[in-house]
Every structure is written in C-alpha cells, then in structure tokens.
C-alpha cells in the first residue's frame, strides 16, 4: 500500500496546503480516499470544519457573503500564512482583503453579475493581491500576473485599470511606493 496526495483549497503556486486529500492505494484500481487537515495554527483548529467544507465546495464568493466578519478575517489570515509558507510575501493586512472581497461582491451584485458570485474566493484573493502589487514571490510582477491571469485578461486589465497595470509594468515600483513605508 502507498499513498497518493492531491491538494485542495488555495491556488498558491506549487503548494496548496490547508486541506489535502490523501488516497490510500491498495492495489490496481483499489483506492480509498482519506481526508486530512493540515492545520498551521490554533486559530485554524477553530476553522477546521469550515475549511473542510470550503475545500470540498471550492468556496465561492457567494458562500463568503453569509460568513461573519470574524470568520472572514480568520480565513484570510490563514490564506496569508499559507502564502508565506509557500515563499510569498503579502504585506497588506487581512482586513484589507476582507474589505476588497466584500467590495468585489457588492460590485457583482450591483451589476447583476450572478456568475461573478460563483468565482472562487482563493482565486479572487490572489487576483486582488497580484493587482494591488501585494503578491511578492520574488519574480517579475508583470510576468507573474500574466502567468496567473493569462494574457487576454491582462489586456483587459490594462484597459480597465491603467494605473494598476502601470505599477505592474514597473515591477510595482513607483515614486510613491518607494518613499512610503509598507503596511
């Protein structure tokens, strides 16, 4: 018998940790899935059952709407911790991302974008971090954005958010950011 692992939950490059599926392989065609939680802090223990559910349902923005502020903050803090474990620096606080996700949802509702509410929370968080120059994995920011978002989406972003695109184009360096302390 040996084990096969497949990761679920957060799209964080080469490592997607919080919840993983462990499958015991007993022989040809005989597999038995075993759920395992990888908990990185005591706070995560409190979220364990919720994280299990989130992993199984690819937690959507629609599901996010029904959660209380404490849960949202704790979940984003865990996302930041996983990113850090994966070698990514995120400087903005978790509360910033909670407000951004809530704003994204409000905009989707205001524009009758029902499909937008079905988007993954993890994908939305990483997209916000990339676009706000807060996803720092040590690579060129514009190239990282293109790799994650795709060239077609990057062209659209250039038209919709020219200031954010310009920052990405300059590897997130601007006169303002060079002179201001990080949050």
Image (cartoon, rainbow, N blue to C red):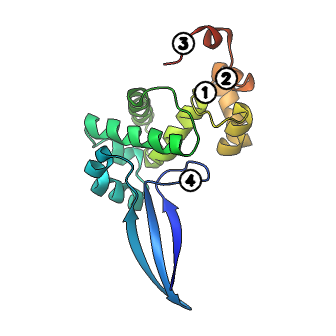
Q: Nearer the viewer, residue 132 or 31?
A: 31
> Are discs 4 and 2 less than 8 Å apart at CB?
no
Residue for point 29% across, 51% down: 45
Distance Cα–Cα, label 4 vs label 1: 21 Å
- Residue 10 percent location from the top left of the image: 49, 50
Examine the rendered structure and indicate whether residue 59 appears above or below residue 68.
Answer: below
Contact check, label 4 and label 1, Cβ < 8 Å: no
- Closer to the chain start, of discs 3 and 4, is 4
Within 10 angstroms of label 2, few (less than 14), some, or many (20 or more) residues? many
Q: Are marks 3 and 4 in contact (CB under 8 Å)?
A: no
Q: Say which of 94 and 123 sits in front.
A: 94
Left or right of residue 65, residue 79 in this image? right
The answer to whether mark 2 and mark 1 are in CB contact below 8 A is yes
Q: Position of residue 162 (x, y in %)?
A: 67, 21
Q: Measure how far apart labels 3 and 4 are at the Cα level.
A: 29 Å
Tag of residue 172: 2
Q: Secondary structure at mark 1?
A: loop
* Residue topped by disc 3: 181
Say which residue label 1 marks.
Answer: 133
Q: Which residue is painted at 61% across and 13% down in the image?
A: 177
Which is nearer the N-term, disc 3 or disc 2? 2
Q: Is residue 25 left or right of residue 99?
A: right
Rendered location of residue 92, percent (x, y): 48, 26
- Give the class, few, some or many, for how many residues have Cα within 10 Å of label 4's Cα (few <14, many ≥20): some
Spatial CA span between label 3 and label 2: 14 Å
Dot 3 alpha-carbon crowd within 10 angstroms: few under 14, some 14 to 19, many 20 or more: few
Which quarter of the figure has residue 168?
top right
Is tag 3's residue or tag 1's residue first in the polypeptide sequence? 1
């Amino acid at each position: 018998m040996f084990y096969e692992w497949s990761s679920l939950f957060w799209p964080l490059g080469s490592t997607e940790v919080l919840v993983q599926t462990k499958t015991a392989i007993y022989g040809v065609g005989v597999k038995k899935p075993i759920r395992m939680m990888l908990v990185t802090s005591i706070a995560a223990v409190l979220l364990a059952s919720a994280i299990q559910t989130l992993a199984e349902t690819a937690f959507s923005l629609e599901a996010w709407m029904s959660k209380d502020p404490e849960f949202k903050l704790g979940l984003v803090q865990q996302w930041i911790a996983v990113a850090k474990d994966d070698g990514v620096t995120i400087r903005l606080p978790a509360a910033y991302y909670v407000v951004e996700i809530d704003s994204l949802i409000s905009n989707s509702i205001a524009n009758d974008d029902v499909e937008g509410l079905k988007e993954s929370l993890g994908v939305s968080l990483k997209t916000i971090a990339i676009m706000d120059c807060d996803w720092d994995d040590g690579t060129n920011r514009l190239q990282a954005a293109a790799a994650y978002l795709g060239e077609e989406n990057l062209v659209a972003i250039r038209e919709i958010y020219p200031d954010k695109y310009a920052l990405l184009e300059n590897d997130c360096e601007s006169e303002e950011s060079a002179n201001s302390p990080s949050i």
